[in-house]
Amino acid sequence: MGRIIAVSNQKGGVGKSTTVVNLAAALGGKNKKVLVVDIDAQGNTTTGLGVRKRTITQTVYEVIIGACRAQDAIVPTAFKGISLMPSAQKLAGAEIELAGLDNRLMRLKMQLIGIKDRYDYILVDCPPSLSLITLNALTACDSVLIPIQCEFYSLEGLVQLMDTIKRIKDGYNSRMYIEGILFTMYVGRYNLTAQVVSEVKKYFPKDVYETVIPRNVALSEAPSHGKPIMYYDRSSRGAEAYEDFCVEFLQRIRERGKKQA
C-alpha cells in the first residue's frame, strides 16, 4: 500500500521544496514509484522537476475543487520513477473557494485515496502557512516530514507546527505521525547550528534524522535547470547528502514496519 507523506513547515525558505524534489529523485533511483503533489501556489517543486507550468491545463487546483479527477492532473517527468501533480498560481485563490465547499478539509484526501496504491510514496509539498490547503495535506497524509533550518526562528515554527499536527490528529487524522525532522542548510562551524540541533533533539529525540543537508551551491543551482541534484551534479555534497538521507529514510520505515508487525 502506498504511503502519503506531507512535507511541511510553517516557515518558508527551509528547503521544503528542495527536499521533496531530491527525496523523490533518490527514491526513484531506488526503483520506487513516486508521485509528487505540489500544493504550494508558488510552484517551486513543479519548476524543480522541469515541468513548464504554462503548458498545463489541469493542476492540483482543479483536483481540490473537484473540477477533475486526481489521475487526470498527473503528468510524467523526465526523471526515473517520478510523476507529478503540478501546481499553478490560481491555487492561491482556492482558499476562498474551499471555504464554501463541503468537506473542505477532506478534498485532497478524497482524491488521493483512489490513486494511493499506484505509488510507493506520495510526497505532498505544502505551502509555508497554516492555510486550508496545508490542512488538507495534513488530513490526507499518513505522516509528516519536517525540514527545519538551523536558526532560532525555525524553533518557533516547529512548535507551532507540532501544535497544528496535534489538533489535526485529534480531530481529523488520528493515524498521522511524525515521519521525521530533517536539518537543512546545515553549517557545522556555526555555534547556532549546534544549539538549534541540541534543542530540537532534546524535545524530539526519536524524530531527528542523523543525516543533515548542508548548504551547497549545486543544490541552489539545480532548480534553475529544472533538475533534482542527482541529475544536475551527482558528485556534489548536496547530492551525496540526499542520497544518504534517502537510505536513512527507507531504513526507518523498514524498522517501523518490523515493530508494527
Image: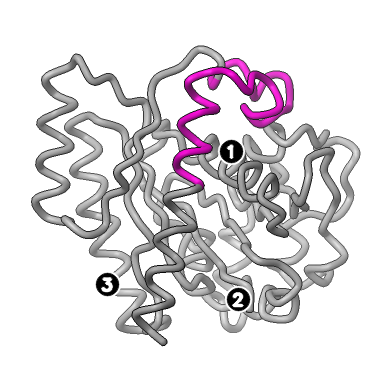
Three-letter code for the amino acid on which mark 2 is drawn: Lys
* First reached walking from the N terminus: tag 2 or tag 3: 2
State the quadrant of the N terminus.
Answer: bottom right
Query: Where is 230 relative to 249, above or below?
Result: above
Residue holding disc 2: 109
For marks 2 and 1, give the one nearer the viewer. Answer: 1
CB atoms of marks 2 and 1 within 8 Å:
no
Residue holding disc 3: 166
User: Secondary structure of the magenta portion, mostly?
Assistant: helix
For marks 1 and 3, give the one nearer the viewer. Answer: 1
Coloring scheme used? one colour
Query: What is the C-alpha distance between the residues marked 1 and 3?
Result: 28 Å
Closer to us: 41 or 35: 35
Q: Quadrant of residue 221?
A: top right
Badge 1 element: helix
Question: Viewed as shown, does residue 75 lie left or right of 35?
Answer: right
Magenta-highlighted residues: 219-246
State the quadrant of the C terminus.
Answer: bottom left
Q: Quadrant of residue 162?
A: bottom left
Query: What is the C-alpha distance between the residues marked 2 and 3?
Result: 18 Å
Who's the residue at 41% across and 36% down the image? 12
Q: Which mark is residue 12?
A: none
Who's the residue at 53% across and 73% down the image? 140
**Residue 47 is covered by the magenta coloring:** no
Closer to us: 151 or 163: 151
Residue holding disc 1: 22
Closer to us: 253 or 214: 253
